Image (cartoon, grey):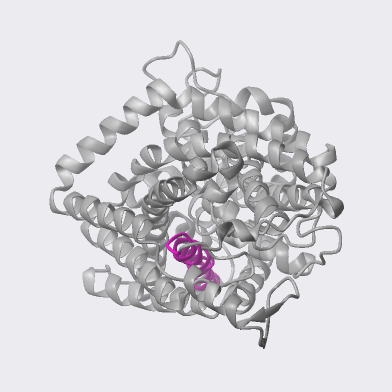
Amino acid sequence: MNQTAVLETGLGEPVTSETEANASERQKINPFAFWPGYIVLILFIGLGLLNQGAFKIFIDTCKGWLSTHFGWLNVFSSMAIVIFTFCIAFSKIGNIRLGGEDATPEYTLWQWFSMALCGCIGIGILFWGMGDPIFHMMQPPQGLPLVPGSRDAGIFAISQAVLHWSVAQYCIYTICGVAIALVAYNKRYPLSVAAGVYSLFPRSWRPAMTSIIHATCLFSLCCAVACSLGAGLMQLGSGVGFLLNVTLGKVMWGILAVGVIGMYTFSSTTGIKRGMQFLSAQCTRIFFVFMLFTLLFGPTLFILTVGTEAFGYFVGNFFRNSMLLNAMVPNDPWPANWIPVFMASFFTYAPLLGLFLARLGRGRTIRQFILVNVFPPTVFCYVWMFIFGGTAVQFQWSGVFDIWAAVQQNGFESTAYAIFQQFPMSTLLIVVFVITVAISFATLADPMTSVLATLSTKGLRVEEEAPIRLKIIWGLTTGTIAYLLVASGGVSSLRGMLSLAGFPMMILTLFMCVSVVKEGLFLLGQPKNYVDKSDEFIS
């Protein structure tokens, strides 16, 4: 039929009834990707909850083996990707505009920054903002000449926390976003992780490869999101329990879980241009208010002084501390608990967060895409860590409050609330922080729910939203798993799954780096760096 519909695509092209039929087909569930990942996920989590003891032993054993034998590969690969990402940014490939030379941006810089920041950081920076530095200060790596609790250990702690949460993770996420966005916008391939590596394999392999990659991604990402949401739920529950002066049980955990699951599931169904855009903008504003309040009413001079010195330490020791594996210190548990695990978790999220970032980048050059997705979040994380990490270090070092003892007694999730008690208007501060945790919960789960739904389809285009029913399925699934883990005490056991999930995602990320070069060189030879290859996916 040649009748033109009223609807237009995100690229400004009229949609015919035939195109609508193709769009409807693309929104259908890909059973070969959805069901294997979903069934294995439910069985794996279910068995773990039924026998947590055996499950914990299995996960810890796998985590220890992978960290010992492949931790170096995680760390080396992450540093190689950092260098590679900046090489791409300042090469000729960096000049390519996503969507072609005539494409225009869909989002302002503020909208882009806030959505990228909140979608990639999620709950982690709230949970670890004070816990990460204090842990490094009181239990530094034995391979360095640092006395636990000392001045040098405190400066190292802030620097290392910044390193864990800044450059490497954003380069890993961003280069995956480049690989996916390049083919989604400039070749009109489907919006999928698998499309980011299509150029490396024969065309006949695409159907099977897509199903295998997406099934693996669905399993890996859902496990990772469940871990993060479980941590967020713990911190949220700790704050509510602190305010109400009660010990939370399974019923209260359930009420909290229902509330946040409903919030982020509803947000995801409204589409990225409404729910996520609104929540991330508000969350980012609250982040800045929190930082300013803590800087003004906390140990201001100490924060500024130690933050400046920690930045110098960070720059001067960037490469060494980015690959700190404590060779020839076999009994030190520090490396196995930190850098290799962090890098594994970043690789676990990388292809999926890359897909999320790809949706924000239309109309930007690859150089802009890389620099905006790496530098502003890195600066933000540095400021966050030196303010909150500096506050934690000062309290511990000066004896104002024994944070380390509180961590050992109540866990990381309660540390922030104990510290906020030392500030004026502490109750109001804690209330706002609890609200921030809830919003951050949503800004992580919203894009990840959308990504999981997108990967479950037969191949959406970059301008198309995933079906609402799939967003609801994945929103309820990840949230329910997070609740079950918290209620059963299994969050710490499941964290080891990040090491398992991260290994295949690391291999996939390295393939995407090769694809960026191959696709980029191909598109440089095309008029306006654009060629429509969408007909390759019309059955």
Identify which residue is drawn at 41% across, 51% down.
211
Q: Position of residue 300 (x, y in %)?
A: 71, 53
Residue 386 visible somewhere in the drawing = no
Could you say which quadrant of the image residue 432 lies in? bottom right
In this rendered view, identify the residue nearer to me: 440 or 94.
94
Residue sitting nearer the eye, 242 or 97: 97
- To which quarter of the image does residue 503 belong? top left
Q: Is residue 134 visible?
A: yes
Q: Is 250 covered by the magenta stretch?
A: no
Magenta residues span: 428-457
Magenta stretch secondary structure, dominant: helix
Instruction: Check the image and report above or below for 151 versus 190.
Output: above
Q: Position of residue 351 (x, y in %)?
A: 54, 48
Q: Quadrant of residue 154?
A: top right
Q: Is residue 285 left or right of residue 29?
A: right
Where does the N terminus fall, quadrant-wise?
A: bottom right
